[in-house]
Image (spheres, grey):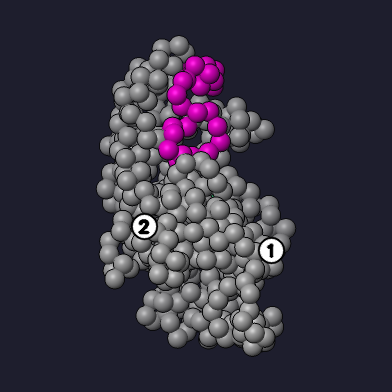
Amino acid sequence: MKDKCRPATRALHSGYDVRQNLGARAVPIYATTSYVFQDTQEGADLYALKKPGFLYSRLGSPTVSVLEERLAAYHGAAGGLCLASGSAANSLLLMSLTDPGQNIVASPQLYGGSSTLLQHTFRRLGLGVRFVDLNDEEALRAAIDDQTSAVFGEGVANPSGYILDLEKVAAVAHEYGLPLIIDNSAAPPPLLNPFDYGADLLTYSLTKLIGGHGTHLGGAILEKGDFDWGRTARHSKYLNAPDPTYGGLNFWEHFGRPNYQRGQSQVVCHKIRLDLLRNFGPTLSPFGAHEFLLGLETLPLRAQKQAESAQIVARHLAGHPKVAWVNYSGLPDSPIFELAQKYFHGLPGAVFGVGLKGGFEAAVRFIDHLELWSHLANILDARSLVIHPASTTHQQLTPEERAKAGAPDDLIRLSVGLEAVEDLLEALDSALAKV
Ligand SMILES: *Cc1c(COP(=O)(O)O)cnc(C)c1O
């Protein structure tokens, strides 16, 4: 019943049964590392995957499992896997789908950590990357070859705010038998559900809007469940081959093929849990999962309110005499305004960039005089946040390199929180008066 309800209801109820938890209304934190086997047969069956259940909390635990099921239900997905951070979600997912010698076709407009992962860490492991504007269909087709394993981008990019034309990108990826993977950290539903537009797998930094209160790091992989991993040879070495660590089990034949036509395949999540999560170990703790369950309960309200306030702040700044530009795609003069209308009904999240007429020096003075907004390296806390990338996260680069990375010297990144928007505007005006 509860999984047939609307997403806001699922965010509160899915994946949890009070009767199996002594009637506890809130989801309990299962603070235990391990689970007692009833007898040796049960232990053997659990290890052989003949019986579902918990063994050891690196692989999964009841509190984390509620979060996984609830996130999946909230997105209309078949399954989910939670991890210790958004970075772990991106690395494990992309690594699981790509063999050495293969390549990932990725948008250049990515979170800085993801660019570094692809360009440096993965290259060392022999996993290639080709950066190309995914909205440029010709360039996208030219970048894909028979060694490409996946297409990867962000729903709304952090920090550039770039929006992918998901329907078109998904259509091209699927034509080549490739999955479309979207890091949707900056715009979870109700802002955007990329599964509605053809995405096959999502990743999240739960640290951001889903947690929503800046208290814990976490990540998630969500699997829509209808992708045919047996269609081409690209993914055959890993997903569609005997796995020597599970007695020769073929994950695709066992978990995927019988279920994907009903949209119920969780083969990628199962495989990563039982291989990369088991062996690398970036587990989300039950305490973290509890924080994210609380965040998820109010996500629909917070996301809507923060996105509405962001629009008010963006409009206000666009009309201010000391502001040179505002990079917010909900404004009619944005080059991607149409995409913001199509995918976000005009409310493309709560993070955007602004530049002041006085450039680098003005940005520094503005931030030093800005009250109420916290100057730090995070986005989408309930509190409003600000950062000047050129003097902090991107200070080691030359001005030219910064511009290429989407962080020009005058860029100030704002993340709009839940404060009374009038207070936010007054704080901005007062700082602007001092630059
Ligand atoms: C923050 C962020 C990440 C990394 O997440 P962590 O939880 O900090 O590891 C990945 N992708 C995007 C888009 C992000 O904003």
Nearer to us of marks 1 and 2 is 2
Label 2, on which residue? 11
In the image, which residues are magenta?
358-385
Q: Name the residue at 37% across, 80% down.
A: 262
The three-letter code of the residue at mark 1 reads Phe
Q: Is residue 138 left or right of residue 401?
A: left
Q: Secondary structure at mark 1?
A: helix
Location of residue 160 in the rendering, given as x and y in whole percent from the top left corner: 46, 40
**Cβ–Cβ below 8 Å for labels 1 and 2?**
no
Q: Is mark 1 within 8 Å of ligand 1?
A: no
Q: Residue at x 58, y 44 (%)?
A: 112
Work out whether 226 lies above or below 285: below
Image position of 168 (left or right of 121): left
Q: What mark, if any, has residue 33 been given in the picture? A: none
Figure check: 56 above or below 358:
below
Question: Mark 1 = which residue?
Answer: 280
